[in-house]
Image (spheres, helix red, strand yellow):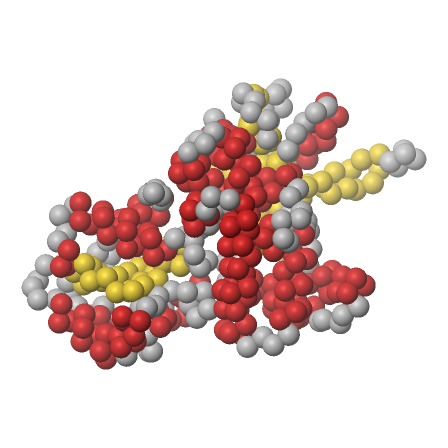
């Protein structure tokens, strides 16, 4: 089974011979090694690069153990470069090598060497790329499978594929399992045996019960506004545990650095400014979120919102949570100021979209409720409602577009429709 990851493959291709180290990051088991050692390797072969000019070394197995010594690895690589043609160097799990930054700085001096590396989350997080390489590293961040990548590989119709994806997510290995029990076990074990161990190892966290409980709370409240103070109060009132807001803020930052979750800031659309707190958290992979809760809370409306958020991020947009302030009359006839939410304020360069995620619009009242905040946005950027039903795209008298989740997920240009 070959999974096409053309988005990331094309990013790598565009960076060939750009005099920088190509650093491939992403959550463990999302397909970084597959992208580098299969898809990109095959691309090079198909475009005339001979196999002996691709030096590919997996540093996380017994056969390469002695190459963890940077001097031996450096010698091994240099001995394979025997002419002036370009050599492509793949170093998978580079963090296994002691003093790897010095090694890579030396290899960069080889004029006919193009270097590509991957690293694991426990010792090689996104911020380390900036810290360690200081402008010499060119990062390519890889996500779990998007829905379209999953759908094109899974081989079933849209609805069956979406149901499967909403429960088990897009970790590539999921496609190799035949039954739900195996999928459940695989995803749960990723947490127990890899992700949380990575976090505890890197940050020296001893009280992992609090760490795990916070992850449970975030899992249960995807798409809900929260902050460290609110979460600290939750621990106190529900768990009878005192944990400071600073500790919680630190844990939340760790989850983001480990690529488990992403946060979205609040943006005052009329005031054109950011609001410091609270914010929303979304999971990088729906299957990992569901596994954390032992598949007990499968709320389709919240999962759909998370899915749309992930898709927007994969497409390269910056995504905020929008707030629109509106003056309305209350039951006493007095005007009161209310804040209505826009699920996503989506930006790319000079383009902007306002998007609402609405699982269903069964009544006119529900439809008016969803578009209320969009109508009150005082600019002409495109306003969109995405619904689960497989409807034909339509545009109302206010210029608001309503489209199906199917069209949004399968047509990357649909926001411009």
- Nearer to us in this view, 1 or 85: 1
- Nearer to us in this view, 131 or 231: 231
Task: Name the residue at the left extreme.
Answer: 83
User: What residue is drawn where x is 50% and y is 68%?
Assistant: 198
User: What residue is drawn where x is 58% and y is 36%?
Assistant: 355
User: What residue is drawn where x is 51% and y is 59%?
Assistant: 190
User: What residue is drawn where x is 67% and y is 47%?
Assistant: 297
- Nearer to us in this view, 170 or 352: 170
Please tell me whether residue 265 is drawn above or below residue 304 in the rendered image.
below
Is there any visible trace of residue 80 in the rendered image? Answer: yes
In the image, 346: left or right of 215? left
Q: Position of residue 149 (x, y in %)?
A: 41, 40
In the image, 36: left or right of 384? left
Q: Position of residue 364 (x, y in %)?
A: 72, 23
In the image, 139: left or right of 325? left
Report which quarter residue 148 is drawn in: top left
In the image, 254: left or right of 89? right
Report which quarter residue 375 is drawn in: top right
Task: Name the residue at the right extreme.
Answer: 332
Q: Position of residue 370 (x, y in %)?
A: 68, 32
Is there any visible trace of residue 316 in the rendered image? Answer: no
Q: Position of residue 15 (x, y in %)?
A: 27, 53
Please tell me whether residue 245 is drawn above or below residue 51 in the rendered image.
below
Q: How many numbered markers are drawn?
A: 0
- Nearer to us in this view, 220 or 9: 220
Report which quarter residue 276 is drawn in: bottom right
């Amino acid at each position: 089974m070959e999974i096409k990851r053309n988005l990331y493959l094309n990013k790598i291709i565009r960076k060939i011979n750009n005099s920088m180290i190509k650093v491939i990051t992403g959550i463990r088991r999302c397909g970084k090694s597959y992208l580098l050692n299969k898809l990109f390797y095959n691309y090079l072969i198909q475009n005339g690069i001979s196999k002996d000019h691709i030096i590919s070394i997996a540093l996380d197995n017994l056969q390469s153990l002695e190459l963890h010594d940077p001097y031996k690895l450096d010698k091994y690589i240099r001995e394979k470069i025997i002419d002036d043609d370009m050599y492509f160097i793949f170093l998978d799990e580079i963090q296994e090598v002691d003093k790897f930054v010095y090694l890579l700085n030396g290899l960069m001096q080889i004029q006919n060497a193009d270097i590509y590396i991957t690293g694991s989350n426990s010792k090689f997080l996104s911020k380390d790329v900036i810290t360690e390489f200081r402008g010499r590293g060119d990062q390519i961040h890889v996500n779990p499978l998007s829905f379209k990548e999953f759908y094109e590989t899974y081989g079933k119709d849209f609805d069956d594929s979406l149901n499967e994806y909403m429960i088990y997510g897009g970790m590539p290995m999921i496609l190799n399992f035949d039954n739900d029990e195996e999928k459940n076990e695989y995803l749960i074990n990723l947490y127990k045996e890899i992700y949380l161990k990575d976090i505890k190892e890197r940050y020296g966290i001893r009280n992992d019960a609090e760490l795990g409980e916070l992850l449970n709370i975030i899992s249960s409240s995807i798409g809900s506004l929260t902050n460290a103070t609110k979460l600290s109060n939750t621990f106190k009132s529900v768990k009878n545990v005192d944990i400071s807001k600073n500790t919680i803020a630190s844990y939340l930052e760790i989850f983001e650095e480990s690529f488990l979750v992403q946060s979205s800031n609040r943006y005052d659309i009329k005031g054109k400014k950011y609001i410091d707190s609270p914010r929303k958290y979304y999971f990088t992979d729906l299957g990992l979120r569901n596994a954390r809760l032992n598949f007990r809370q499968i709320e389709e409306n919240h999962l759909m919102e998370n899915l749309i958020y992930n898709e927007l991020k994969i497409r390269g947009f910056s995504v905020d949570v929008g707030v629109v302030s509106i003056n309305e009359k209350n039951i006493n006839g007095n005007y009161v100021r209310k804040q209505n939410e826009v699920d996503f304020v989506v930006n790319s360069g000079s383009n902007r979209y306002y998007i609402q995620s609405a699982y269903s619009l069964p009544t006119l009242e529900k439809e008016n409720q969803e578009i209320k905040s969009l109508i009150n946005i005082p600019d002409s950027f495109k306003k969109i409602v995405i619904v689960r039903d497989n409807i034909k795209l339509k545009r109302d008298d206010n210029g608001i577009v309503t489209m199906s989740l199917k069209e949004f997920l399968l047509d990357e240009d649909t926001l411009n429709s």
